[in-house]
Amino acid sequence: MRGRNTGKPRPGRYHALDSLRGLLLLQMTAYHALYDVVHVIDVPISWYTGRAGYIWQQSICWGFILLSGFCFRMSRRPVRHGLTVLGAGLLVSVVTYMAMPSEFILYGVLYLLGLAGLVQCAVWALWNRGKLPPFPAGLGLGLSLAAFFLTRNVPRGSLGFESLELARLPGWLYQWDGLAVLGLPGPGFASSDYFPLVPWLFLYLAGYFLWRMAGPRPAIMARLKPGLPPLAFLGRHSLLIYLLHQPVLMGIFTLAQALG
């Protein structure tokens, strides 16, 4: 990351990015609809609970986090945006705790995106004030991805990526639930949607560095202007849709069960 601003946020919207966000929202809604079918209505779907379903879920999460990091500098008020998303994440925690304790969400993906944005605001301010040295975008992207893959399994107690375990981490790191937000959950921690800062902040930073590589190139950014209007509309209202889609799905399935 560079200590000086490399360019002002471009005017207008990049509808291709909104469209991509809208596509991810549709996939997320479909995934959560099947989640309700499997875990609430109790209808078994073997592929969904197997490897294929896991890869699908991860692709949606990776897409949202990378895209959010890429769009960090496009926000006119990144601090307010980060606080808004973080507040939405806290709202999800409160609602699930009160309405569906068995599906309680703590440090979910919205919480991560809001907190990662605020962390990025703080660090970016230090670079702009010359408190930190310039950081080449290509090197930053490589280091961010390497850190993500190295720490992917930290919440599970080891260094490594998925089934590749490089080294076990000391058990004493996982004795306090208060460190769960960092990726070190204690023995009593539980959440049905868990995205701690480690490793996911590194994926967010990878998205930011991708923007750093593309942002100074008008020809590349110009290609992101057009989009698909229906998907772009969904993408522009992603936070509201995220907050409402699960209650709507639950209402539909509850009504279907009552009528059935």
Image (tube, helix red, strand yellow):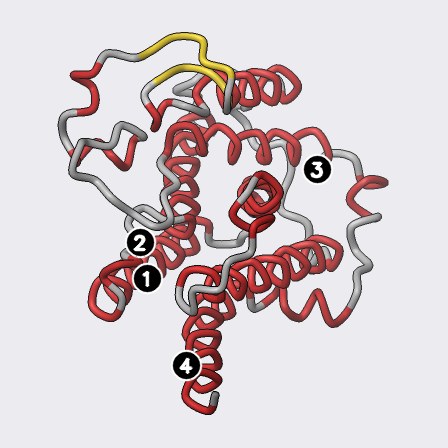
In the rendered structure, find residue 215 and report the number of the disc placed on it. Answer: 3
The amino acid type of the residue labelled 3 equals: Gly
Q: Distance between the residues labelled 1 and 2?
A: 7 Å
Q: Who's the residue at 39% across and 44% down the image?
A: 112
Residue 72 shows up from this direction: no
Disc 4 designates what residue? 254
- Mark 3 or 2, which is nearer the eye? 2
The quarter of the picture where residue 88 lies is bottom left
Determine whether label 1 and label 2 are within 8 Å by CB: yes
Q: Who's the residue at 36% across and 43% down the image?
A: 194
Q: Which of 211 and 256 is in front in this view?
A: 256
Classify mark 1: residues with Cα within 10 Å, few (<14), some (14-19) or many (20+): many
Point out the tag, 1 or 2, that comes first from the N-terminus. 1
Q: From the viewer's perspective, is residue 232 above or below residue 113?
A: below
Q: How far apart are marks 1 and 3 (CA)?
A: 33 Å
Point out the tag, 3 or 2, that comes first from the N-terminus. 2
Left or right, residue 253 beside residue 31 = left
Left or right, residue 123 beside residue 94 = right
Disc 2 designates what residue? 105
The amino acid type of the residue labelled 2 equals: Ile
Q: Which of 104 and 108 is in front in this view?
A: 104
Q: Who's the residue at 65% across and 36% down the image?
A: 211
Determine whether label 3 and label 4 are within 8 Å by CB: no
Determine whether label 3 and label 2 are within 8 Å by CB: no
In the rendered structure, find residue 92 and report the number of the disc placed on it. Answer: 1
Q: How far apart are marks 4 and 2 (CA)?
A: 21 Å
